[in-house]
């Protein structure tokens, strides 16, 4: 008889769901290692390289020895650059001391949830949603409450649906616009209405604007313009500047919230990579070069989006046109009524890796990323067409 192990996993970890995105990628990579030709449309990562002026700033930082610890909340000059970015691009007034730099946008969200939520609190999250929001909220002991947005509207939020779910325990609203996985961009009138109800009910808004520069047919507006004392704005360098692996996120908001997030980070990871911070500073301060890169990338994404949406709809897989980000949600019920089984068929039979909508709260749908070449999209559409043709 073997003795019991000298440990017990915590209840919070035992209830944590693994990321479905990571699970699909792992399966796709395993097939690729076996020599199988798999088209991966499951990962939310730009296929562009980090721009040269950003890489040059990182190299210069290394060569000049700027590789030591930084302040937990980020280099002062980077926080000044972020403050200026919020002012000039978002119309938000965050002093440098009301800005914090984190190890990716996900840490900013994690810090915010643990700084603001207690067990038993309720958090409203429009769905379909990014899979990590409810899991991070649940880790705090709070309860995530989904607020559905319908596909026929382009997944736009109805503020009345949000307000109908407010209870005395509601402490927070999480917004993501442009959204993952929907690509929805909430219009100014919707954001103004949400800001108003948050102020009336005394609710904090955490808005994830990581895809703010990837907007195609809509106006990107920060909700913090209308409710500055009720809003924490989270964004970062990953998507717009093709800096996913550099792991730089940042947030601005009320000073007490930022101070609490700083305290949490000081007892966990401490500051972000010094070299990555100098690279991010170049992205934010060398604006002409950065703007040129964003324009080029955005034009490419728009062309890819249009081709993928048209192709999927032509195949009978209803797909709303996203207004931002680089994802589509496609209705795969013609392939199989269960989105998990549809994703499995697409991977195992068509060799196209997608993410089932299960963990996004998007039943009957799968997410495809168009952060890949037009040639890859064309090949994926051909494979999906062949698979649909084989269906009875």
Image (cartoon, grey):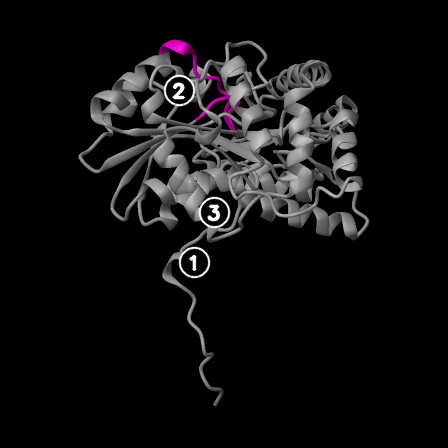
Q: What kind of element bears circle 1?
A: helix
Can residue 135 be seen here? no
Residue placed at 48% from the left, 31% from the top? 251
Classify residue 109 as left or right of residue 123. right
Classify 10 Å Cα crowding around label 3: few (below 14), some (14-19), many (20 and above): many
What residue is disc 1 on?
Answer: 13
For residue 172, what is the image quadrant?
top left
What residue is disc 2 on?
Answer: 224
Q: Earlier in the sequence, mark 3 or mark 2?
A: 2
Can residue 24 be seen here? yes
Q: Position of residue 55 (x, y in %)?
A: 76, 32
Q: Earlier in the sequence, mark 1 or mark 3?
A: 1
In front of the other: 10 or 384: 10
Judged by its main secondary structure, the magenta piece is loop
Q: Is residue 89 magenta?
A: no
Classify 10 Å Cα crowding around label 1: few (below 14), some (14-19), many (20 and above): few
In front of the other: 187 or 357: 187
The magenta region covers 176-189
What residue is disc 3 on?
Answer: 265
Q: What kind of element bears circle 3?
A: helix
Residue placed at 70% from the left, 26% from the top? 381
Classify 10 Å Cα crowding around label 2: few (below 14), some (14-19), many (20 and above): many
Q: CA distance from mark 1 to mark 2?
A: 33 Å
Q: Position of residue 165 (x, y in %)?
A: 24, 29
Location of the C terminus (image quadrant): top right
For residue 116, what is the image quadrant?
top left
Position of residue 336 relative to residue 154, above or below, is below
Q: Is residue 184 magenta?
A: yes
Residue placed at 21% from the left, 38% from the top? 169
């Amino acid at each position: 008889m073997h003795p019991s192990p000298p440990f017990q996993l915590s209840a919070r970890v035992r209830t944590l769901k693994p990321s479905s995105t990571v699970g699909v990628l792992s399966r796709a990579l395993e097939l690729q290692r076996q020599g199988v030709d798999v088209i991966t449309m499951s990962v939310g990562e730009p296929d562009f390289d980090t721009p040269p002026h950003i890489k040059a700033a990182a190299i210069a930082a290394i060569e000049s020895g700027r590789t030591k610890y930084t302040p937990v909340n980020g280099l002062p000059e980077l926080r000044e650059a972020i403050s200026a970015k919020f002012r000039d691009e978002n119309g938000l007034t965050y002093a440098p001391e009301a800005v914090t730099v984190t190890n990716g946008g996900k840490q900013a969200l994690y810090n915010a949830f643990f700084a603001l939520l207690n067990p038993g609190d309720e958090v409203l999250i429009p769905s379909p949603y990014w899979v990590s929001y409810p899991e991070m909220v649940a880790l705090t002991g709070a309860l995530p409450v989904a607020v559905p947005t319908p596909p026929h509207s382009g997944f736009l939020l109805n503020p009345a649906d949000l307000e109908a779910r407010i209870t005395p325990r509601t402490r927070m609203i999480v917004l993501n616009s442009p959204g993952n996985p929907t690509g929805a961009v909430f219009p100014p009138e919707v954001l103004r209405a949400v800001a108003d109800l948050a102020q009336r009910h005394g609710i904090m808004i955490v808005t994830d604007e990581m895809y703010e520069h990837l907007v195609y047919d809509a106006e990107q507006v920060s909700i913090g313009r209308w409710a500055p004392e009720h809003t924490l704005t989270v964004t970062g360098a990953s998507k717009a500047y093709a800096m996913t692996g550099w792991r730089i996120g940042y947030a601005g908001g009320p000073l007490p919230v930022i101070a609490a997030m700083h305290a949490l980070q000081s007892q966990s990871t401490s500051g972000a990579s010094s070299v990555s911070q100098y690279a991010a500073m170049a992205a934010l301060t060398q604006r002409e070069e950065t703007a040129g890169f964003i324009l080029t990338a955005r034009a490419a994404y728009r062309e890819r989006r249009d081709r993928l949406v048209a192709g999927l709809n032509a195949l009978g897989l209803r797909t709303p046109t996203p207004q931002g980000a680089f994802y589509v949600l496609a209705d795969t019920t013609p392939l199989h009524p269960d989105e998990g089984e549809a994703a499995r068929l697409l991977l195992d039979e068509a060799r196209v890796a997608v993410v089932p909508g299960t963990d996004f709260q998007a039943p009957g749908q799968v997410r495809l990323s168009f952060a890949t070449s037009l040639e890859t999209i064309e090949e994926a559409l051909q494979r999906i067409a062949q698979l649909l043709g084989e269906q009875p």
